[in-house]
Amino acid sequence: MADILIVDDDSMLAEMLAVHLGNSGHRAECAATLTEGIECARRGRFDVVFLDVQLPDGNGLNAFSRFAETASRPEIIIMTGSGDPDGAKKAIQSGAWSYLEKPHVLRDLLLPFTRALQYREEKQKISRLPVALKRETIIGASPSLASCLDQVATAAASEATVLITGETGTGKEVFARAIHDNSNRAAQAFVVVDCASLPETLIESILFGHVKGAFTGADRAFGGLIAMAHGGTLFLDEVGELPERIQKTFLRVLQEHRFRPVGAAREEFSNFRVIAATNRNLDQEAADGAFRADLLYRLRSLPLHLPPLRERKEDIRPLSRHFLARLCDRAKVGSKGVADEFFEYLHAYDWPGNVRELQQTLEQVFATAVHHPTLFAYHLPQQIRVCKTLECISAEAARTRSEHTVPPTSPPVTWKAFKAEKEREYLRHLFASTKGNIRDACTVSGLSRARLYQLINLHGLDPETSCRD
Ligand SMILES: Nc1ncnc2c1ncn2[C@@H]1O[C@H](COP(=O)(O)OP(=O)(O)OP(=O)(O)O)[C@@H](O)[C@H]1O
């Protein structure tokens, strides 16, 4: 017997589905809105959620992760309107087990539902196995990182080719190593091929090796990276950069594990496993003919997408603490205190360079504050401080705007007096956000230094004390 949650505002359909499932020995509960559904999923334990897309208080697909991340981690079957290919595609991309078209839910339900339960049962058996994932190099505890770690465990237990995607600096190489370190191949080599820096004329020789005298300068035989990865893992970093000429040859090597070193008469064999990574949209490139679609499908037996840091900001604090502790260790200095607003500033920033940018920023901060026992927001690079400051100012502007939608109850003042008061308010806030730093205040406000000093005099303000008001 399974526990099912049906989230649909069509009460007749929900009821019919509940009765149908009840007749097969399952226990079904219904919710008519997203809010009610999420609340039910949090309170109860469900094996499967049937989730409608169009709900009165929002789109089911957008709330997908809120169901998937509840304690019982249910399998989710999406119910879409009929003939909505976009909805169906989005459902599968968000990790739904399957999708059913609304008018045929009862007719089409049996197979996906049975398979989802079977999958769930097997998943629970596997997760009960006492396997501890070695993940010392991977810091973070956000739900999305946890889900990536689940996928690392699955990939490590299999021999399938993995394609890791994600923006630059999200940790693709770290995750590739973690898959290798947790696999049966851990004792053998992890060979990195940086496809972006392979010299065009030497690619075959670097990958497949060469015999002595194969070309001018080949005064010794070389085994090649594929041979080196025998028994271990071949990590193709930036695989999208692999020249077209090699893509075809490589596809064959990937399928047959046989390759011919340059100048050799015979083929060699290597038992390697491939993990590839890219920050490019290879689907698009395959559609445009810039990357071989057959190679892409072959590489992507198991896909693993790493979310950017801005979508898992919970990881910023533990990552920062980890990097700072490592820097203190290396410099042989005691651990440093970190002011709370330091993290607030890190949170407000979008981290286009992801974890790598965070790590480099902290190295920079550490170098400038090596003798300071505490790190303050002031130690952070200017672009990060400006970002937080702009966030404060726009929040303040929104607050002021909303205050002004309320009809004024006090008698109107002159325009001049009103403007002066708003100017003073703005300046006070500007100094509070920039900690009284004139240079930052000019950057953020766009005022020249001369105009800023003029306004300070006019309103009799002191930037240093204003920032503490
Ligand atoms: N979750 C994490 N925990 C600890 N360190 C991490 C994590 N993710 C990334 N890093 C660190 O961030 C840096 C960048 O990681 P990595 O080289 O794996 O990124 P990448 O996605 O392969 O980048 P690129 O696409 O530019 O090659 C490395 O120093 C790595 O150790």
Image (spheres, rainbow, N blue to C red):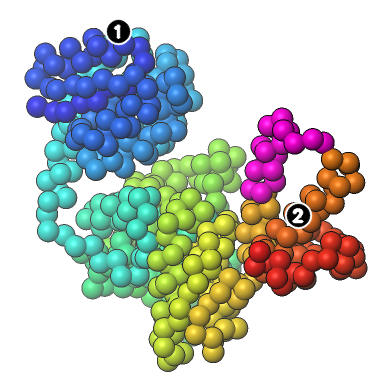
| Residue found 12% across the figure and 22% down from its top | 26
Q: Which mark is residue 426?
A: 2
Q: Is residue 166 magenta?
A: no
Range of magenta residues: 395-412
The residue to which callout 1 is attached is: 12
> Looking at this view, is 230 or 134 the one in front?
134
Instruction: Choose top left, top right, bottom left or bottom right for residue 184.
Output: bottom left
Q: Which mark is residue 301?
A: none
- Where residue 241 sits in the image (x, y, percent)? 55, 58
Instruction: Choose top left, top right, bottom left or bottom right for residue 40.
Output: top left
Confirm or deny contact between disc 1 and disc 2 (CB under 8 A). Answer: no
- Where residue 92 sits in the image (x, y, percent)? 38, 32
N-terminal of the pair, mark 1 or mark 2, is 1
Judge whether residue 404 can be spotted in this image.
yes
Q: CA distance from mark 1 to mark 2?
A: 56 Å
- Where residue 245 sits in the image (x, y, percent)? 54, 55
